[in-house]
Amino acid sequence: MTVLACTCNRTQPIDAQALQAALRTPVVLHHALCRREAASFQRAARHGDELIVACTQEQRLFTELAAATEGVPPPDVRPIRFVNVRETGGWSRDAQRATPKMAALLAAARLPEPEPVPTVRYTSQGRLLIVGPLEQAAALADRLSDVWQVTLLGTGGALPQAHQHPVLAGRVHALRGWLGDFTLQWVDDNPIALDLCTRCNACVQACPEGAIGLDYQVDLNVCRAHRDCVRVCEAPGAIDFTRSPEVQQATFDAVLDLRSEPAFTQHALPQGYVHLPPTLDAEQRLQRLWALRDLVGTFDKPKFFRYQPRLCAHARNERVGCQACVDVCSASAIRSDAQHNRIVVEPHLCVGCGACSTVCPSGALTFAYPDAAYQGRAIKTLLDTYRAAGGRDAVLLLHSQGAGQRLVQDWGRAARLDAALHGVPARVIPWALWHTASTGLELWLSAIAYGASQVVLLLTDEEAPQYRDALQAQLAQAQAVLSGLGYSGQHMHLVQARDARDLAALDATIRTLPPAQGVAVAATYAVLADKRATLELALQHLIDHAPARPADDTIALPSEGAALGTVQVDPERCTLCMSCVGACPAGALQDNPAAPQLRFIEKNCVQCGLCVRTCPEQAVVLQPRLWLHTQRREPRVLHEQPPFHCIRCGKPFGTLKGVETMLARLAAHPMFQGAAAERLKMCGDCRVIDIHTHADVRITDL
């Protein structure tokens, strides 16, 4: 492998020898690689070895140059990877100390690409629905008709006289779907049928109340039933006041909505739905319309999630427990299916934010592309290389590949020109995620276990509001664990910046962040596909190297977003009916076949609350916490009772508390009096024998 580094006209210091020692691979230093030294790039590109270029600004130029150079392997055989070390550190005020970070970013670029995942396909045949005022809708239809087959649904205004595009009349009843599969239902409740109307305007002139406009619809609140319009429309026959309103339906591939209020209320709108309200400026309108022109054809995207119903803690016996994923989804892609004890995720609506996997306590939902194992390898590589190169107190700055990455680049460029800005500090390692919400508790704590001092999540305006709340709750869980284990300082941070307007505040916040205490020995484990297994590995490493432990080995956790904890059982209420055992999706609550006992494995508990909602005696309460005792992995008895012995044969059956409760509740029931009441105290065999030994057997005794 070869690394080509460039000082960008000597505007950033790069220690090639130190990088070469840290990476154990040749690092060739240049000062104008994209200009007079471009031949050096061509020579390096001809070799079959892996090639990394420490520049992203001229990525397009280098890619085109490689394609035009004879002997360069094609990208699918030997891709050339590009890494930004300039804005992320080379242009900061402490760029001289940024070598460990540069080494870390270059080392992470050597990792293989994530494993491919199944794809989700959209097929758009070019059927576009435009909803809105007719003049605007018709004008846009003319500009888009070279790409789309346009249908209009008017919300007032005037129709053009020429029949250029199909026009639907009525009120929108429902609109659902996604690119290639939108279903529109509308109520056609107007006397004028637009498919028959010739737009001769005779009805407009004849109406004495002026109830008919140039949209050729009758305002029934103004109409006084003179029916002059019907008389003058005799030949076309387009007006019929006796026609009953009916709901009609049609399908479209995309929707352009010109109304002020969108048809969809979720933060992440469905692919293929473009909202163009009047409040947008010219640049925003052009951007959205231009994107719409590219939505005809066949498109594939990764299936971003994996769902394992057997792990899901959403529902049991039609009782709903955890619904964190349903609540946090900004695309309305997840719905409850309590009847089948599961959730349903619509992959065509999923936008790949990963927030559902972050808040999922059981690991039933996981982010698939890239998956947790890949992100774990990347984070471990970053921190191991940074530490080996002499770096200290690393801050892992997680941001999105979209607005977050643009913000980091703007930050670095602004610091180059503005003396008041520091730039990305040398100890801050930016790492781009598909979406900021796609990592969670197990990866953040793993980052600390791998040697990071802090983890910072950078949010922008592209994240849904509920993401901030969910991420803040998860960060609070992680911080409570670290503080409870005696690690001093604030390890988990959430920072929000809209765009370049907030660069000064972002710069000041990150620059003044005091280091927090990390682990004395970095972890060596690998992040696993199983979320709970990875979380256990991270917790165990942090516990093993904890500076201090609570006297009672218990760390209280915030109740919001808790995925760890115990359950408390009221012995006065509990009858050991074991309803909670049947409802527990994680195997945390267990019975004992050999004795009337309710047992509990705390490590398995996901705090979903199904046991609380299922218990008929309301005897169960959740308690979020991290118990440090080794017994958290082993079954322990929460409640037990002596068995009730059959009054006839002495065999144990049921529990004393359960039988006593049953007798108390049935004491006044007419079917359980006298001998029948005594039979309730017998085992099943003795009950049958007792019934058949009495001559006065009645059907009610059976």
Image (cartoon, rainbow, N blue to C red):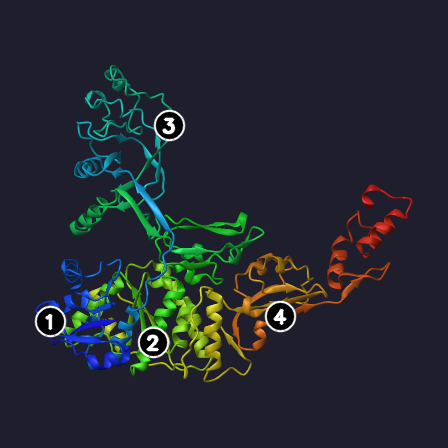
Quarter of image, res 162: top left
> Which residue is label 2 attached to?
383
Q: Residues within 10 Å of mark 3 (few under 14, many from 20)?
A: few
> Residues under labels 4 and 1: Cα distance?
65 Å
Three-letter amino acid code of the residue under disc 4: Pro
The answer to whether the residues at label 4 and label 1 have Cβ atoms under 8 Å apart is no
The answer to whether the residues at label 3 and label 2 have Cβ atoms under 8 Å apart is no
> Residues under labels 4 and 3: Cα distance?
65 Å
Question: Residue 345 in the image: x percent, y percent?
Answer: 43, 50
Q: Earlier in the sequence, mark 2 or mark 1?
A: 1
Please tell me whether mark 2 or mark 1 is closer to you in this view: 1
| Most foreground residue, 657 or 143 | 143
Question: Residue 547 in the image: x percent, y percent?
Answer: 45, 85
Callout 3: helix, strand or loop? Answer: loop
Question: Residue 144 in the image: x percent, y percent?
Answer: 19, 39
> Which residue is label 1 attached to?
32
Three-letter amino acid code of the residue under disc 2: Leu
The answer to whether the residues at label 2 and label 1 have Cβ atoms under 8 Å apart is no
Quarter of image, res 174: top left
Q: Quadrant of the C terminus?
A: top right
> Which residue is label 3 attached to?
245
> Residue at position x 29%, y 21% from top?
239
Please tell me whether mark 4 or mark 3 is closer to you in this view: 4
Please tell me whether mark 4 or mark 2 is closer to you in this view: 2
Callout 4: helix, strand or loop? Answer: loop
Three-letter amino acid code of the residue under disc 3: Pro
Query: Can I make out residue 558 in this image?
Result: no
Three-letter amino acid code of the residue under disc 1: Ala
